[in-house]
Image (tube, rainbow, N blue to C red):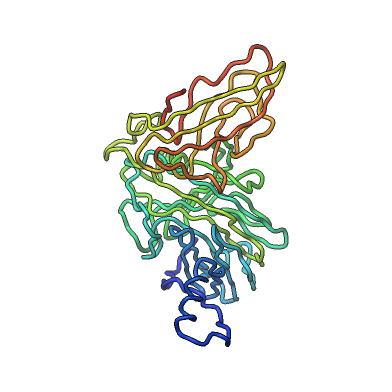
Amino acid sequence: MRTLRPRVRAPRGLLGALSAACATFALVASLVTAAAPAQADTTLCEPFGTTTVQGRYIVQNNRWGSSATQCVTATDTGFRVTQADGSTPTNGAPKSYPSIFNGCHYTACSPGTKLPARLDTISSAPSSISYTFVGNAVYNASYDIWLDPTPRTDGVNRTEIMIWFNRVGPIQPIGSPVGTATVGGRTWEVWSGGNGSNDVLSFVAPSAISGWSFDVKDFVRETVARGLAGNDWYLTSVQAGFEPWQNGAGLAVNSFSSNIETGGTPGGDPDPGNPGGTSACAVSYGTNVWQGGFTADVKVTNTGTAPVDGWRLAFTLPSGQRIANAWNASVTPATGSVTASGASHNARIAPGGSLSFGFQGTYGGTFAEPAGFRLNDVACTTA
């Protein structure tokens, strides 16, 4: 839905007022240097104001559909909408799309991004998002994935994938409903249409999802299967934010991560079961078992030479086992094929590094351990 070209400018720092008691230039300089790590949050009220967070993502105010004031405040890990004046008709376009992104959007490219990247060279694109919702507004919480036949870094892409994590009020996606689909282990209502400048494929959650770790490539594969993109197309950006029609103050992206794992070769989608063909991880699975219950302590080691960001460890619980609670990771669903993903404090595993998490569960019959583990779609050795 974003049709206007944002104006891009460099992020602005905030310099606090110095005390009148500072008598020398040397003292002033030392105070400024000491204060730099504790720099205050940046607030953007310009329609297309931007700033960088986490040293790798761009937060954009992106107020394109209204002249009313909107302000967003960038935090260490995301942003929050601090002012959201005005409204637009709910049967038309929203006011804006305040968001955070990895990749390139209208000539603005996030620091160190691997995007644009050709789809058939991307083995996985792990991402995680945490939202704060409000009830006194009309909006959606939308995760956008942009695809184009060319590696463009400006303008509107050919296909937009929208993941609606939440919708509040009488609004609906572009186009019309075309059924349901299971993507990333969840069932979605699917809408398909166009806005005059690009195709839009929307996946709408049946109920609000405030946080999730998933693989963007799963939604890309579904889009390719529906003929709205090709494996020789390019992923140009992934974005998470909100489309407000009325109000919106208090909405927030608490945290966001996006990583692009390459390893395929042009001309074919890499084997999703083992990108690159080699193991770069090791897992030890220690248990304490009693009648009807158990705890598991899992240690994951990165045996590769590159860091693993936004890690996801997939494994299958033997029949009859159910997870009751977990620590140091989110583990979902409770039974069957489950995925553990890192929290904000342990989302990265450095080369040669390891981390541990655990969970408590119940079981029936004979207790058994999972047969294997995959870290971001790569098979791990077991210790």
> Residue shown at 50%/63% (left/top)?
59
Residue 221 lies, in percent from the top left, at 42, 39
Residue 305 lies, in percent from the top left, at 34, 39
Residue in the foreground of this view, choosing between 150 and 373? 373
Residue 266 lies, in percent from the top left, at 27, 40
Residue in the foreground of this view, choosing between 12 and 119? 12
Q: Could you tell me how many numbered marks the image carries? A: 0
> Residue shown at 33%/33% (left/top)?
276
| Farthest top residue in view | 366
In this picture, is 246 found above or below 296?
Answer: below
Q: Does residue 5 appear in this view?
A: yes
Residue in the foreground of this view, choosing between 340 and 280? 280
Q: Does residue 183 appear in this view?
A: no
Q: Is residue 208 left or right of residue 46?
A: right
> Residue shown at 67%/22% (left/top)?
294
Residue 194 lies, in percent from the top left, at 47, 55
In this picture, is 18 found above or below 191?
Answer: below
Q: Is residue 369 left or right of residue 199?
A: right
